[in-house]
Amino acid sequence: MNTTLHLHQTHHTLADFEGIFASTVELLKTDGLHLFPELYLTGYPLQDLVLQRAFIDKYLTFVNKLDHWAKNLPKASWGALVGGLTYDVEADSLPKKIKNVIFEIAPGVGMRALYTKRLLPNYDIFDEQKYFTPGSENAFYEFNGDTFALQICEDMWASSFHELDPCKLMLEDAQKKNLKLKAIINLSASPFEAAKKNKRFERAKNISLLFGCPFVYVNRVGGEDEILFDGTSFVMDGNHLALELVSFKAANGSFNFQELKGQYSETPIFREENTWEGLFSPRIDLKSKPAVLKTWTQSECADVLAGLQFGLQEYAQKSGFKKFLVALSGGMDSALVLAIVKLSLKPGQSVEAIYMPSIHSATLSTELSELLCKNLNIPLTYFPIKFLHSTVKNAFKQTFTEPFEGLVDENVQSRLRGMLLYTRSNQTGAMVINTSNKSELAVGYSTQYGDSVGAISVLGDLYKTEVYQLSNHINQHFNDLIPVGIIHRGPSAELRDNQLDQDSLPPYERLDPMLEGILSYQMGKKQLINLGFIEEEVTRVLNLYLKSEYKRSQFCPILKIKAKSFGFGYRIPISKNLNYHL
Amino acid sequence: MNTTLHLHQTHHTLADFEGIFASTVELLKTDGLHLFPELYLTGYPLQDLVLQRAFIDKYLTFVNKLDHWAKNLPKASWGALVGGLTYDVEADSLPKKIKNVIFEIAPGVGMRALYTKRLLPNYDIFDEQKYFTPGSENAFYEFNGDTFALQICEDMWASSFHELDPCKLMLEDAQKKNLKLKAIINLSASPFEAAKKNKRFERAKNISLLFGCPFVYVNRVGGEDEILFDGTSFVMDGNHLALELVSFKAANGSFNFQELKGQYSETPIFREENTWEGLFSPRIDLKSKPAVLKTWTQSECADVLAGLQFGLQEYAQKSGFKKFLVALSGGMDSALVLAIVKLSLKPGQSVEAIYMPSIHSATLSTELSELLCKNLNIPLTYFPIKFLHSTVKNAFKQTFTEPFEGLVDENVQSRLRGMLLYTRSNQTGAMVINTSNKSELAVGYSTQYGDSVGAISVLGDLYKTEVYQLSNHINQHFNDLIPVGIIHRGPSAELRDNQLDQDSLPPYERLDPMLEGILSYQMGKKQLINLGFIEEEVTRVLNLYLKSEYKRSQFCPILKIKAKSFGFGYRIPISKNLNYHL
């Protein structure tokens, strides 16, 4: 039949049942089949919320209301598929079984669950097997005389890593039943990663070719603390991308099967993404020795920038902040953070910068901070910590006999800044944005409760060399917003005179690929040396990495833009025998 | 046959393969069957370590060495069962399948895997389904003419919550095969909880009665960051506890079947622990209205105290600290923390207290801090923050136009203390011990980067009323170590004049059971009101709880002494629509 499909990549706060009800009623008017993301009815990921009686009560009441609304509509020529949960609850309303399902909403009929997600991801940030019971059946859905095969997110990714391949099972079943499928419909809640879009397209193309019908992908939009959902819903028609929705924005898109013109002559080629390693999409270019980090394309840089702006705004808006506060150092990281905050600002929002020089801060740092704020048109407050620093130092000298020098004297400057920054935040109600990068986090090159403070980390999933890449990308597209003096000076914490990062760390060009090897390739010393790195440097880096676990454990949420970030999906015990890695 | 069983509740750091090898060689000498805990060969929980090539390489090398050692021994009359991992690895030494197994070590023969854990716990802190593939077979092990049924930890706990009941499957299998079982052997890595010991005994008794043979339970000892393993291995012989090893200490115990004299006439009664609620063992006494928190018995208080001392020492020793640093306020929490640290000290260790009064600190706080340190024989440093406080205040007044009052002025005192405490820690190399309690954490009644700082939290799983219980317990057993003046004064943060906790919070007698309802009973507003609490107070508490998630997300590891603590097993998104709970 001549059916129109409507893709709705919606954007709601977790558990905003009123908002979700309103948008459902609003969108379900037009003829055709309406598609909404995985767990559209609740949001995702919910974690322990799904176990709370208050959540369960409110959710079930909402679903009843929606069902009632649909039942009482006059019959009409639309249908809808929405992601949601079904509960098998005990008498006291605690859950026995929870399923991640696709509901049909039919006007004049109501709601019914059609399909239960079969492949529950349980790696990295995913804990679905903690909460959900998997399905064991395929689902073929009839609408308007056409047959659609249904999937939820991970179901499309099966490979050597999983026990189960839902695509394969579905295809066999469809062939056995002699079904002519109109399309595969996949409702997703799939987190953003730089360069993931093309992986999805490639996979979708292969599934479309395999089944000989279009693959329709509807993904949610939302920033859930560290996890970003980009939407980017699409329709893959054989080898042809027939529709692509925007990223990081709620959007609706429609298509009619008559309009499609994809070719189905190619043979699908499935790569096995879902090995342990494939899951973490390591980004090392092995062509040179020592190995180097793969660089992002301009389009990937643009996606990363969009993701960071989106994630920052999501966290701020959901936490109720309208003001931002960034501590500038005159260096690269804080400059990039400030630029990203500025570029992300919505009407009614503002950002303030504060520069807190100590006796070790170079005049150049002051000048570059001023220039940056001038470029960005942001008020800069100059708040020197020299007097406070010496006051603390004197008090310590009067009270204690131990020397006040080295790390003691360095860290105190950083912690004074942390304290002042949060005092200012209390004064204005601004959200403090953390300025650490992934390289720093990996080697513990920051002061706990000092420069590591913040409500959210914007750069915590970018290695230092990627910080430079993104800065250059911004300068190319926004008329040298970031002073080139900042990009070109050597990185320094400026906690003692003439301090440079490279005094205690290998150059970032070598450090970053080593870290990527450790974090995303599961590499140890042996493998890193095989990549062409010097043993002494490898050992030093591994030592720094292993000994700084405690700092990462108290860090703020990090906007996740890679398959493996320091955050909810990174689960390493602090206490352990470090020799296993050395 | 007349077999002796040796129970070894061992204590090793995670991945300390050399230490584990040495202790295995040391212990395997005596005739009889030697039993070691779950994952004895690696430690537990390993989390992502099991995926790292370095870990896998080192572990497999170690297992080969152990196998080789056993193979080359002369035949002897001992055998051993040890917990470990088996790996099915890909060519590049990344894992395809990992199993949590029991190995036999046989002199002159070597090692072989006998049994794979069937029930993989995946709730709260447990993520075993993330890493391990479950087994599907029972294992009956022959030693010296006797037949033993093998289990790993969770296998004994199956109930309505799980799909699978390994005990039931094993019993049916044994009956079908007409086996006469000598004993059930359960190798465990089971975390400590106050009052859990008796639950284990009760369950073991029922399994022993069900099978008509003794139940032998060997549990590991260790503090892994927040998670405490108490050992407390035992033999349950029908209705009779035939052997019980100490808690929180490596120990060995042996028994011979001829010595046993248990009765097997009772009928087992299994309670369903493993519902969602049962898993979190809520501690509310429902007899009074409003409901109150159950109080601990003296023996439970003693276990909790032992657990906290053990966990603190484990974290300190594994992190390489020999000095402790505690900030005293003159109040209950810091006094109890200091007492616990003092009671836990090992030779060569020391603790220092620092008291940092502001203009709002009462003279009584000073006197009580001095008295406490006198009782405990701990050096106390007096480090007033008045001048620093006014210096910051003046600098803000000169730099910014916004008022410096209310929360701004309160938090700055707390953050100055955090900064000074860590400066002192940098000076002496001492570990800073956090002094927050669970009630404070639940309602966000602390200053981020202020009084919430620390390497580890000792009281973070104790509600305020439990802090008092434990203090009274200590005073009864250690001659009023904590000045009664501290126990009897009203709780106050002393960040403004005449401030009392009760000004902004309900009395702890009502707050604590409300929090337990929310956290361990999954309760919402409706259920709390049904428990007899006032709606206005419930709403206030829920609001405080919901809005402070961001503070908990950056908190240090909390020694876990309950089924549900704020820590690794507590997984609640920060951003969400709060209305679902109100």
Image (tube, coloured by chain):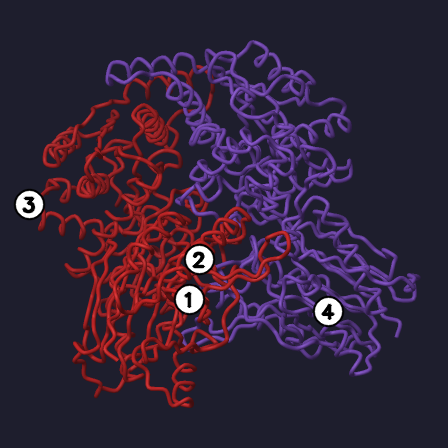
Chain colours: A red, B purple
Helix, strand or loop status at disc 4: helix
- Circle 2 is placed at which residue position? A68
Which residue is disc 1 drawn over? A109
- Give the crowd class for mark 3: few <14, some 14-19, many >=20 residues within 10 Å: few
Quadrant where the C terminus of chain A sits is bottom left
Label 1 and label 2: CA atoms lie apart by 9 Å
Q: What amino acid type is highlighted by mark number 1? A: Val
How far separated are the C-alphas under marks 3 and 2? 55 Å
Closer mark to the observer between disc 3 and disc 2: 2
| Residue holding disc 3 | A479
Residue B169 in which image quadrant: bottom right
Residue drawn where x is 86% and y is 57% of the image: B242
Mark 3 vs mark 1: same chain? yes
Q: Mark 4 points at which residue?
A: B167
- In three-dimensional space, the C-alpha distance between marks 4 and 2, rounded to whole angstroms, equals 45 Å
For the residues beneath circles 4 and 1, the answer to whether they share a chain is no
**Label 3 is placed on what type of residue?**
Asn
